[in-house]
Amino acid sequence: MAMSNASVNLPIVENAIGIGLRSPHHHRVLDEQPKVGWLEVHSENFFNANSTQRHILDQLADIYPLSFHGVGLSLGSVDPVNLKHLAKMKALIDTYKPALISEHLSWSSFGDRYFNDLLPMPLTLESLDVFCDKVNLVQDHLGRALAIENPTVYLAFKHSTINEWDFLNEITRRCQSTLLLDLNNIYVNSVNLGLDAKCYLDNINIDAITEIHLAGFTRKQLENGEILIDTHGSEVSEPVWELFRYLREQCDAPALIEWDTDIPALEVLLAQAHRAEREQQHVERQQRVNA
Amino acid sequence: MKLRQLQLQFSQHLLHQPVDLSALDVIGPFPVEQLMGLYRNNFYISLSQYLEACFPAVLALVGEEFFAQLAKAYIMQSPLDKAELDVFGAGFPRFIEQAEQTQSLIYLGDVALLDWAFDSAKAVVHIDVFPFEKLAQLDELQQLKIRFQLAPETLLIKAQYPLLKIWLGAKSGNLDDVDMQESDFVILRPDSEEGVKFSSLNAHQYQFLLNVKAQKNLEQLAESADVNEYLNEYISQNVINNFCLEDEV
């Protein structure tokens, strides 16, 4: 299978900082064209070719490099790939030729019923086979590599036998796919499940990372204590900025500010993008000093 | 546990079906019931928030708590059979109309219809302009057989209550001047300039447009209305924006 990105509409440059484009900001971004490196949209929101969203995306595609972030392929489900969904995805990708295409290490459907959520997988050899078979099928159909995003999980399964980073690394090896590393997800999981976030970054295949996500979480009180919820509804937290600086020392993949709930004014989103630029400039200065 | 069995039981838990959660072999910072409860809440809350966004006037009329009950019942009854949510709310107005708990709010289903139709009309990107040239090419006999078409996503509703005032009042938070004894005929449609237009009609206007929507031909329309007056009005407003020949139906 050819995994060429030669037909990309506008490429995303190294270290570029982008923002997730959500409907409350469509018109302002189009009118004001703020200086951001790229835009990411949820693929499923743009399947309808006759929608006003598509009309806006048509215009933005001439201005910004695009990334299509899918939430509906349900690659971790034992259900077969939904070919109707895949056909819509292919039509969208063939139309816009985005620089990046991504999906999640999760499942969201069973028995043809969808749950509008990214549900956790046990990390076993069986899951790895199921997931890789579907990634291969999708990539063959699209003629493009997918970036697979590490998930937020609020629980683990006792019968898991593989570390998440090893699981993701093996997917990239078997499928020639890439990684979308969400640093907020790593941080949230590290707090909730008592894991070591920097150990995760030390073990993930840095060379496979083609995109980084930065987002915020909220704290939820349960009966027995507090848990972090990956709501994408607040500013990036300081521990996540720290992980970003740590990763930036070794990885220059483009990064994105992702904000999906309680969506703030565009200025807030842009300020977060500027913070990301400052953080990576700081890392570059440190590297020059150390050199 | 095999992946298929795990996903079956996980799904059943999300749908409130009885499941032995201990069989899932879950580990985490809290008891399995609380952790699985997070996923179940996320499922209902995300779809409920989607419905809230689609039905703002219904939400304003019944409040968050009652809306959440309606939404949960609808979500349980209406399987989401694809990943996109675009048409998931389409059945909500009918569900509201039939739900036991809304029977005292007779207007609520129609308010929901207006909410849904507003978004549908707003999403129309292009509205054809009436093809006068094509019409001029037809002879008189052919013209009598043509069937006019309403602009896409045009909604017509006949109500035994002041529907438009209730809908607008709910959206603005002011229902003080609504006289529930009034009846209403409402049209809501896409508009090239304003996005969406809506207004009340009189009974004759409503019946004429309903006949157009029912695909009656020009000859049949002329039997019950002053066709020229209505056609002039509605073609100039682009409410009627196309026609088809009898053999094209």
Image (spheres, rainbow, N blue to C red):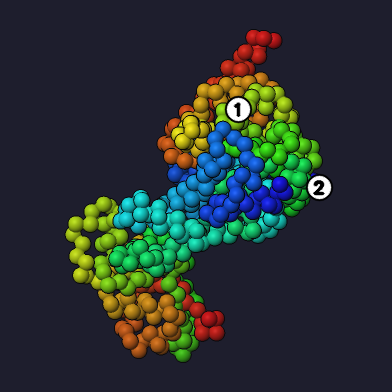
Query: Where is residue B107 drawn, in percent x and y?
Result: 31, 66
Marks 1 and 2 on same chain: yes
Q: Amino acid at mark 2?
A: Met
Query: Where is residue B40 drawn, in percent x and y?
Result: 52, 47
Query: Is A185 above or below relative to B21?
Result: above
Which residue has dot 2 on it?
A1
Per the model, the C-alpha gap separating discs 1 and 2 is 40 Å
Q: Residue at x 30, y 56 (%)?
A: B61
Q: Is residue A98 visible?
A: no
Query: Where is residue A211 drawn, in percent x and y?
Result: 65, 34
Q: First in sequence, mark 1 or 2: give its number.
A: 2
Mark 1 is surrounded, within 10 Å at the Cα level, by few (under 14), some (14 to 19) or many (20 or more) other residues, namely: few
Question: Which marked residue is nearer to the observer: mark 1 or mark 2?
Answer: 1
Q: Chain of mark 2?
A: A
Q: Chain of mark 1?
A: A
Left or right: residue B30 versus residue A80 is: left
Query: Where is residue A60 drawn, in percent x and y?
Result: 54, 44
Front residue of A29/B154: it is: B154
Q: Amino acid at mark 1?
A: Gly
- Element marked by disc 1: loop
Q: Residue at x 42, y 61 (%)?
A: B116
Which residue has dot 1 on it?
A194
Left or right: residue A232 versus residue A97 is: left
